[in-house]
Amino acid sequence: MPPKLLNNFLEKENIDPDLSKLLFSIARAGKFVAHAIRTGDLGLAGTSNLYGENQLALDVLADMIFTNHLKATELVSVIASEEKDDAEQINKNGKFAVAFDPLDGSSLVTTNLSIGAIFGIFEGNNFIGKKGRDMVASCYLIFGPRTVFVMAIRGKILEFTMNELGEFSITNENMQISPVAKTFSPGNLRASSENEKYAKLVDYWQKKPLTLRYSGGMVPDIHQIFAKGNGIFSYPSFSKHPDGKLRLLFECAPFAFASEQAGGLAKDEKGQNILDLEIKEVHQRTPIFIGSKEEVKKSLEYLNS
Ligand code: P6P
């Protein structure tokens, strides 16, 4: 039985052919980024992004690789990258607006832990005023022992794993998230020292008991919820980031879109669905609780008790 490859799927599924071409191009770019991570320069690029974070050579390189691939499709009107200060118009006739974090968790590269890239895809030519719910697709890549590409379209989320020939072969045709969590990924534990309700929530998870699974990389930490079919990931606000650390457009909304296709849920600390948060500026941040529906709801009860 020949492996079911990404391009076969994209041809077979009744997806907009232009969206298929865009998704395939992102996955293809991922192969080059995976290679760069394995072989690239881990030194600093000598530049820094607007958060003042020193950009690893790999951040800059990954941003360039994805940007060039998106431009080459001639389907993208505007891009917004976590590594770029502002959104960038690239083709006035483009059909899609693409927001991405080209290398999330890059600080984990030197510890050889898994990292990833995250994409949110809208139709049109802008992001401001839109909501995550307006996305037509989201996808992410995990660069770890294996290179994995996960794409979420309306009603379906599929996982592909790169084989020895560099092809993405289907490894999960329809990932689903159970309402009941068995694992927890408590991000930003330092917030417990100033947020007693978060401290109580983490204590509740430990005593339930849920099994702790946390690497510090948002992409693998959330992917495990899809791959294992259950779990909860949290990153609350704290004094250093009153609106939360993680970005709405580049990180939280794409994962919220994907989780909704799998029967999961993603909310902010106030209990608002991440997909209903209006994008007011491309670098907007939000707290996030994402994963098994019942566990997310329970978490929000603790935080708002
Ligand atoms: P902290 C990595 O830098 C990242 O953006 C996410 O991948 C991860 O979930 C989070 O930050 C970790 O944040 O504050 O614990 O380093």
Image: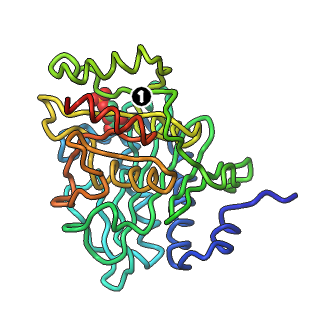
Q: Taking the image as drawn, is residue 44 in sight?
A: no
How crowded pointer 1 is (Cα within 10 Å; few <14, some 14-19, many 20+) is rated as many
The residue tagged 1 is: 185
* Disc 1 residue: CB within 8 Å of ligand 1: no
Q: Secondary structure at mark 1?
A: strand
**Residue type, label 1:** Ser
Residue 141 screen position, x and y as percent: 51, 49
Residue 285 screen position, x and y as percent: 21, 46
The structure residue drawn at horizontal position 46% and vertical position 73%, both measured from the top left corner, is: 72
Q: Nearer the viewer, residue 26 or 226?
A: 226
The structure residue drawn at horizontal position 46% and vertical position 38%, both measured from the top left corner, is: 115
> Relative to 239, is 287 above or below?
below
Q: Nearer the viewer, residue 207 or 243?
A: 207
* Left or right: residue 269 compared with residue 32: left
> Relative to 269, is 134 above or below?
below
Q: Taking the image as drawn, is residue 278 in sight?
A: yes
The structure residue drawn at horizontal position 35% and vertical position 85%, both measured from the top left corner, is: 93
